[in-house]
Amino acid sequence: MSGREQIYVQEAFDTNWIAPLGPNVEGFESALVDYLKEDSHVAALSSGTGALHLALILLGVGSGDEVICQSFTFAASANPIVYLGARPIFVDSEKDTWNISPEMLEKAIKDRIARGKKPKAIIAVHLYGMPYKVEAIREISLRYEIPVLEDSAESLGSSYHGVKCGTFGDISILSFNGNKIITTSGGGALRTRDNTIKERAVFLATQSRDEAPHYQHSAIGYNYRMSNVLAGIGRGQMEVLDDRVNARRNNYLYYKENLGSLESIEFLEEPEGYFSNRWLTCILTPSEEIREKIRLSLQEENIESRPLWKPMHLQPVFSKCESYLNGISEELFSRGLCLPSGSDLSLSNLERISHTIKQIVA
Ligand SMILES: *Cc1c(COP(=O)(O)O)cnc(C)c1O
């Protein structure tokens, strides 16, 4: 927290706006609109997962449909597909950004169409804050007329050729969960260029209540709107978003400078024109065995680190889903490690972590 959050939260208490609507919700939405630019319309919601769920509904996904999803991601990207009775089709990653491979995506689309069913949407994720290959994915989306749902949960503050992540999808989502670059403790947002889609999202998120003096419903509704108290936290957090991005990028730079010369440690570089918020700094080691040695030695020093996301096609719950694979996400999962990356890591913490890794690798 920055300290600014409590001013807005206090305002909610002083004015008795303790509800899933109010001035902080509107204020937080307009702070996001100002930040994202690109004619954004934003609905603040109770979670990123809820935002994904509504986005799929708004893209027309229903029972029996197929939705393509980046396999290398957190389960929340894929779960809402199943909430709707639709089927996830997982697509592997490419080496430059670790995100959905345009080549594999096109292969998957062609194959699904050949089997008689065109996928209803493509969920692409900017994992760990690194933008996916925006232009290549958009080109495929336009060519096959399949909309992109941009999962920007980990990439607020990242950009691609100067344009902010969270503005590239037909619909985009953000998360403000406690572990993200800024937080409302729990929360999310849905972003679109089309104000009628935003209004429809708010309608669905507030129990789909029709215009009438009594309670009337012509659609199934959800309780997904953001609390005005939590939106106050969000307003305070927006004021320090750029500081948080700098802090995360400085973590990366520190690790890179201190570990980058070691032969057995690789970092993910930003391709030309890509700007990552470096939400988490990740390294690649030569093998799972060495990765585990590093992880366990850090643990002995009371330093927490974690393997990269386990791809969805390897998750027991998705074992029956079809997938289009090239081995890359499996390799990232076996060789990769997320290093401590908090915005409040001190220099002495960074020194201690790097020192521990250097000792093991040596
Ligand atoms: C955190 C996260 C989500 C879900 O957001 P919540 O606000 O926690 O529901 C979705 N996708 C990715 C890639 C995430 O990291």
Image (cartoon, helix red, strand yellow):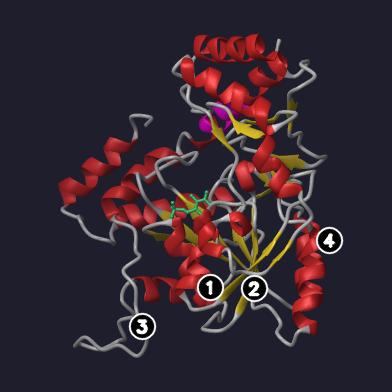
The residue singled out by tag 1 in the image is 56
The residue singled out by tag 2 in the image is 121
Q: Nearer the viewer, residue 357 or 125?
A: 357
- Which range is magenta? 244-249
Dot placed on the residue nearer the N-terminal end, 4 or 2: 4
Dot placed on the residue nearer the N-terminal end, 3 or 2: 2
SS of the residue under disc 1:
helix
Residue type, numbered disc 4: Glu
Q: Which mark is residue 220?
A: 3
Distance from disc 1 to disc 3, alpha carbons, whole Å, reads 14 Å
Relative to 280, is 151 above or below? Answer: below
SS of the residue under disc 4:
helix
Dot placed on the residue nearer the N-terminal end, 1 or 3: 1
Residue 321: percent from the left, percent from the top? 61, 69
Q: Quadrant of residue 7?
A: top left
Mark 1 residue CB less than 8 A from any atom of ligand 1: no
Relative to 161, is 285 above or below? Answer: above
Residue 146: percent from the left, percent from the top? 71, 75
At horizontal 49% and vertical 57% (from top left) the residue drawn is: 76
